[in-house]
Image (cartoon, rainbow, N blue to C red):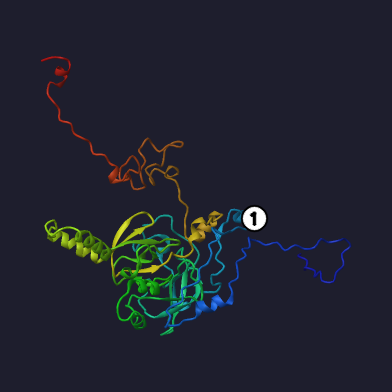
Amino acid sequence: MLQPRLALTGLRLPFRCLPSVSRSYSTVIHQKETPPAEESSTSSFDPSIGFAPPPTRDDAGVLLRTYTPRTPGVRHLRRPVNDHLWKGRPVQKLTFPKRGQAKGGRNNTGRVTVRHHGGGHKRRIRVVDFARAAPGPHLVERIEHDPGRSAHIALVRSKETQRISYILAAEGMRAGDVVQSYMAGIPEDLWKSMGGVVDPGVLAARTAWRGNCLPLHMIPVGTLIFNVGLHQGKGGQLCRSAGTYATVIAKGANLQAAQRDAEEGLPEEEKKPLTQREKQKQERAAQHITIRLQSGEVRLLHKDCCATVGVASNPNYQYTQLGKAGRSRWLNIRPTVRGLAMNAADHPHGGGRGKSKGNVDPKSPWGLPAKSGYKTRPKWKVNKAVVVPRVRNQGKRRRGYS
């Protein structure tokens, strides 16, 4: 039978006790306190001077929270420090439960189409506004964790309509910041401040701030962006995971201006008239913006596609260590079994006696070759065989025969 715990208040013990030392279960990160003057300037909004940009915060490197190894599961547990996240529950009307066979990687007929999916904790899907079509200033009320994605989301409230919505949070965005979307066009007060004429420098200085959603043609060259759209009128589809971004490297108008400047120095005789194909190419370049992804891929997107200025939040997510296998099961991830350990009916490498894949070339679970260059080597690395024409009696002439 369990004994009740005695209260030691006012109780004298026959031996001397050492002073109690408070031990923390995890590493404590001491953050610098910002003065109240900066916080007030961040949340204040004055249409005459524009939207106050969020304050710059010093980057202290990779901050990971470690835990005292009281159990084997937390000995290798590493998590990024995100003490600014909301501790409560999400907005109920902006979520819906994730149910059905989709959690297990099945399609509508019940067949497994995505392997290693299944189980996991109950979760609710957050309805995130990727298009950001609503104009006007929006106040960031809080930053939340989304179990369905690696980046964080921000709950914003429109100052004009008081409607709330979830958007993808940019790195450095905090509660109290003011963000705006310019997808519907340039506001009237901004037009008046520029004198009714579009000044690219003033426009970029007033709009290209972290967290603002802009059409690609309004973003200056060299700006880091995320949540990039692929088609005009649709929401962002590229660079939505934690810490990802793209870079605007060229605009069609800039290319045309450089080409005109190069032709001005030439005499009239050397200027060649453009062909129909060259005219179409110039028109296409004028309507598109060139961006570079983190992988090095260069894409040409329409100038009216949406993009958010900044870097996707939670960039230290890549350094996370789960610590134990059970935490993967909580995240809806099932074990990955080697094909060599399967039966012959389940994988081309399965079966046999001992650790042998049956004297066959490495193959995928569906029988396609997985190595040796078949569908794995890039096309630009494949060297085409050079065919050398064969000369008759070449061997006789080399040996000195006529």
Query: Residue 390 at x, y = what percent?
Result: 15, 27
In the depicted structure, whether residue 361 falls above or below residue 109? above
Helix, strand or loop at disc 1? loop
Q: If the image is split into quadrants, where does the N terminus sit?
A: bottom right
Mark 1, residue position = 69
- Residue 129 visible, this angle: no
Query: Residue 292 at x, y = what percent?
Result: 34, 58
Q: Within the image, what quadrant is residue 384 found in?
A: top left
Q: If the image is split into quadrants, where does the C terminus sit?
A: top left
In this rendering, the count of numbered labels is 1
Q: What residue type is labelled 1?
A: Pro
Q: Say which of 382 and 175 sits in front.
A: 175
Q: Say which of 220 and 321 sits in front.
A: 220
In the picture provided, is 8 more to the left or to the right than 186? right
- Residue 20 visible, this angle: yes
Query: Residue 237 at x, y = what percent?
Result: 35, 65
Q: Residue at x 58, y 77 (%)?
A: 36
Q: Which residue is drawn at 46% across and 81% down?
A: 45
**Dot 1, how many residues are within 10 Å of its Cα: few (below 14), some (14-19), or many (20+)?**
few
In the depicted structure, whether residue 269 falls above or below residue 378? below
Name of the residue lying farthest toward the right = 14
Q: Within the image, what quadrant is residue 272 found in?
A: bottom left
Q: Say which of 183 and 353 sits in front.
A: 183
Q: Which residue is drawn at 54% across and 70% down?
A: 85
Q: Say which of 263 and 214 sits in front.
A: 263
Q: Residue at x 40, y 60 (%)?
A: 105
In the picture provided, is 81 more to the left or to the right than 208? right
In the picture provided, is 328 more to the left or to the right than 306? right
Query: Residue 232 at x, y = what percent?
Result: 28, 70
